Image (spheres, helix red, strand yellow):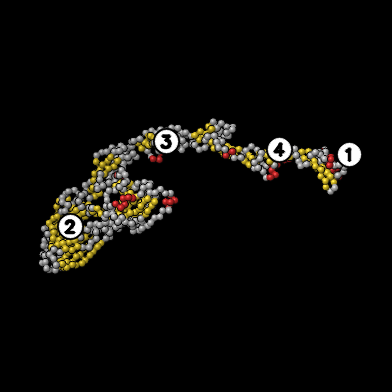
Amino acid sequence: LLPLLLLLGLARGATGAPGADGSDVCASCHKHATCKQGEGKKMCICNYGFVGNGRTQCIDKNECQLGDTVVCGNHTSCHNTLGGFYCICLEGYRATNHNKTFIPNDGTFCADIDECEVSGLCRHGGQCVNTHGSFECYCMDGYLPKNGPVPFHPTRDATSCAEIDCGPPPDVPDGYILGNYTSRLGSQVHYACREGFFSGPEDMVSSCTAQGTWEPPKLNCQEVSCGRPPEVPHAMLVGNPSSRLGSEAQYVCQEGFESPGGRITSVCTEKGTWTDSTVTCTEIIIEINNVSVFNNTCVRWQINAGRINPKITYVINIKGQQLDPVESDHKETLTFTTDSQTPEVCLDLYPGTNYTVKISTAPPRRSMPATVGIWTAVKQTIGNISIFNETCLKWRSMKTADTQEMYLFHIQGQRCYQKEFAQEMIFNVTISSQTPEVCLDLRPGTNYSVSIQALSSEFPVVISLTTPITEPPLPEVDFSTVHGWPLPRLRLRKAKEDNGPISSYQVLVLPLVLQNSFSCASVRATSFFSNTSDADGYVAAELLAKDVKDDAMEISIGDRLYYGKYYNAPLKTGSDYCIILRITSEWNKVRRCSCAVWAQVKGSSVTLQQMAGVGLGSVVAVIILAFLSSSAV
């Protein structure tokens, strides 16, 4: 019926005819209608928000009947009013025009409210997580929920977040806890076995877990028992030591062997094993040096003293070839015992015979034999030959003082430590003296056989001569100046054995202020643990020459490793240091050293980026300490 009435009203209004009572059309418009005139006609039209014929009916139009989402958008509530409507955002959302109500004709919509912007919303230990139109609470790391569910809402749930506390850690049989600890999440307890017990290092930690309990410790302390001490080559065990912790086994070297490094011991450790001794038994090899002939038939020599028992038995093998082929050769072996460090023996030799005399030791001693030639010819004009100033010879000539004599020298040099080395020199000199002297141009650290034959004699005189070593070549280093840490890896190059055998390479750490007063031959620098402070410096590493590769190797200062018996300790932050490389040569009781400054460390506090930018100056042959002493015997 309503639609029919509306159509009738519209039809009448459209005609513009006066009302039934003859009045004007505009006077008959509904109160929610407006009179409009067009094309000479007047009509009543319902206002916006109303529907009807404009005269008898203008009914409110319900804009919300199509649905909240269609009219107002997502997360909204639509509210109809007389002749209009308005929108309200649901709880947890707010209008983008920041008003409580809106009509979405200007693009306004409802945006989610981030409730988590309010601190403390989820109470102590709680963590807020925003959701669409709301939020949820969870417990932070290190906290556990109590008295309610998770996730929870503070307005409806009684859930509280309590800090995780694992309580006291579990006990371990025969073990104890090291240091202090806390019972919070992630805290660790370090265990150790009591004295006399041991366990693996990977099982000594227990952690407080997120469940509020301690991880079960895996530590299994077992009583230490090292068993029988290990065998040491060429050594005998002294006594019958126990296998308990701290027991010490002592050894003595067998006959013919010695331990130059000191006592040989092994200690039962807390791991149930015996320590390896750093000292070993080495075979005693006697070096026979500086063999010389005097009084024509007597021989004198020297041995390496200091490590040998007082009495040694020598074997003298004599082989002589006479000039006259009718006569038989002279062969003889004799022995004698002496405790002298410079033994000598006079031989019963035939005149006119060329002898080779070989000197060695009798078992159980081993030696490096030495050989000397003796010519007992009647016409021999060279006698009482001796060595002075290490490389000079003097002898007595049978010639008169004003008679010139030509002498032919044939010199051959060899080195037992450098098999590829060989030197040979042949020359002659003319001297008019009854006590000639000649100084030879010989290489250091070399065993020489020197043959001298006078032009007037038929056979030469042969003597052995050993030259002392001199300073080894200066170390070849790439000098570095470093401000702060870490230090660059220092490159160690192997030195040539030109002046004698290279024994070892030592890395010394000195306070920088001592650089100008340091003596290369100084023995004051000891191991890191031998000093109460490092004010005098210390030896950080020692490498035997046999352990250094031919090309090169690298060493990092402060890497906390042992090199030989020396500990490579970390450098102290903020201190200035001088790193020195010392090359040592030892031979025939003589010790020589050469040193070079390897690096200077300025201990200023710098960042890692600054340290990466520190320039390294490569100086390939070396910034040498000009003040360093050259040798020490």
Judged from the image, the secondary structure of the residue bearing numbered disc 1 is: loop
Q: Which residue is mark 1?
A: 21
Q: Residue at x 83, y 46 (%)?
A: 37
Q: Earlier in the sequence, mark 3 or mark 4?
A: 4
For the point 33% across and 36% down, which residue is it?
196
Q: Report the Cα–Cα distance between label 2 and label 1.
A: 165 Å
User: Label 1: how many residues lie within 10 Å, few (<14), some (14-19) or many (20+)?
Assistant: few
Query: Quick one: SS at disc 4?
Result: strand
Question: Residue flagged by tag 4: what amino acid is it?
Answer: His
Q: Nearer the viewer, mark 3 or mark 1?
A: 1
Report the residue marked by disc 4: 79
- Under circle 2, the secondary element is strand
Mark 2 sits on what residue?
A: 291
Query: In this picture, is 365 found above or below 421?
Result: above
- The residue that disc 3 covers is 181
Say few, some or many: other residues with alpha carbon within 10 Å of mark 4 (under 14 / 14 to 19 / 20 or more).
some
Q: Residue at x 23, y 61 (%)?
A: 442
What type is the residue that disc 1 sits on? Asp
Q: Amino acid at mark 2?
A: Val
- Please give left or right for residue 26 compared with residue 265 in the image: right
Residue 160: % across, % down: 53, 32
